[in-house]
Image (cartoon, grey):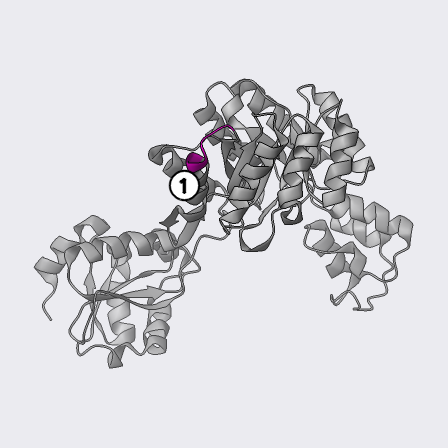
Amino acid sequence: MALKALDIYKILPKKNCKECGDPTCLTFAMKLASGKGDVTLCPYLDEGARSVLGASTRPPVARAVIGVGGRSLTIGEENVFFRHEKTFVHPPGIFFEVSDTSPDDLILQTTTRVYSEAVTRVGQTLQWSGIAVRCCSGSQSRFADVIAAIEGTGFHLPLVLIADDPVLLEAGLAKCGQFRPLVHAARKTSANAITAIASRYDCPVVVQDPDYSQLLSLSETCAGHGVHEILLDPAPATLRDLLITASRLRSDAIARSHPGAGYPLYVNAGNILGSQAALLLAILKFGGVIVTPPLPTHLALAALTLRQNIFTDPQRPIQMSPGIYRVGNPGPSSPIFLTVNFSLTYFTLEGYLEATGVPCFLFLVDTEGLSVLTAVASGKLNETVIKSAIQKADLEALVSHRTLIIPGYAAQLSGRVEDATGWKVLVGPRDAAEVGEFITREWHA
């Protein structure tokens, strides 16, 4: 079990030397307990204490990195079973699978799509993670040629190499091993050969076994051979299997009841009955790497949106930087719409304002990413905050009028804002979809 801060403090030398970068040993202990500290920073721990603290303070799910460079993928380092307990840390990688028996143009088309397809949502760019290449030909040269062609695009996407034969995997690694692809899979009969190859190329490896106990034993075997970036593939056949096994692995990892469970989960959704539902379930239930056939547009959008939503920190809403944003080409007589810096509010309102065709200013006040209703109720949006924001943005120099449009859900602030700022306040609609009608009816420059 993970140690609490006071338990860790009892093991520390209590010198308060500050050499770890923290002012006291207790502060350092609290960092370790929360998973944000590094036990190696304490120079006075003996090896026994370092080993005990390292095992109990590192994240229950180990870290793994696939690929190199800007499009590399980091997974693992998870600490909780439910997102609302703290947060999920690293979104799963979603890899489109291609077969080496597919036509070359289809393989390159899929590769190009993975590299270039992107969706912008609430200020974040959502993309696919990489390509999974399955060797169906049984040919070393064909498998190697497909991998070489993908690498030849210059996209530098993370890869998953899937083959049953270690010889085939080594042929593929000869073309891309320096880029740290994920190797699938070490099984009971091939674990020694696969881990030797993975160690030689310093690549992460997937261990696969449908038997839960054998899967954990196999991961320990691979770790004992010096491979520490491991993923677990329980090879579920149904959605029920996936849900039960994924939940059991995460539960055992958090409880630290078996060291073999403490690795990220690998899911090939295409091998599960109901593959599209399996993809979404794997996003929800602890997938680290998810391999899927290329997705149709509607499901692609659903998967990317779901992943973004689940891996947004519930304690830290997605925020925009406070300040002035221009919609169109506004001038001195253009209206100013004040709102909060919750990104979803910003992008929703911006979209409706653009649709009106009326140039205007969008004035975001810092409410720590809270929505309008929450910010008003908590006092994060009030007349003092608004007055300070107006002064900081120098609104008087921006426009020739002194009229501010505030959200409908902040109507109760209108009088206080006028008294505090000297600006005239118009109360806008509660629903952003009605902003066009509001401008036509109420705005007179």
Q: Position of residue 294 (x, y in %)?
A: 43, 33
Q: Dot 1: few (<14), some (14–19), or many (≥20) neighbours within 10 Å?
A: some
Q: Residue placed farthest to the bottom in the image?
A: 397
Asked where in the image residue 39 lies, by quadrant, the reply is bottom right
Seen in the picture, residue 25 relative to 211 is either above or below; the reply is below
Asked where in the image residue 12 lies, by quadrant, the reply is bottom right
Identified at 75% across, 47% down, the residue is 57
- Residue that carries the numbered disc 1 in the rendered image: 305
- Mark 1: which secondary structure? helix
Seen in the picture, residue 179 relative to 257 is either above or below; the reply is below
Asked where in the image residue 218 lies, by quadrant, the reply is top right
What segment carries the magenta color? Answer: 101-106
Identified at 35% across, 57% down, the residue is 376
Identified at 54% across, 55% down, the residue is 70
Confirm whether residue 289 shows in the render.
yes
Queried whether the magenta region covers residue 321, the answer comes back as no
Q: Amino acid at mark 1?
A: Thr
Q: Position of residue 22 (x, y in %)?
A: 73, 65
Identified at 66% across, 34% down, the residue is 169
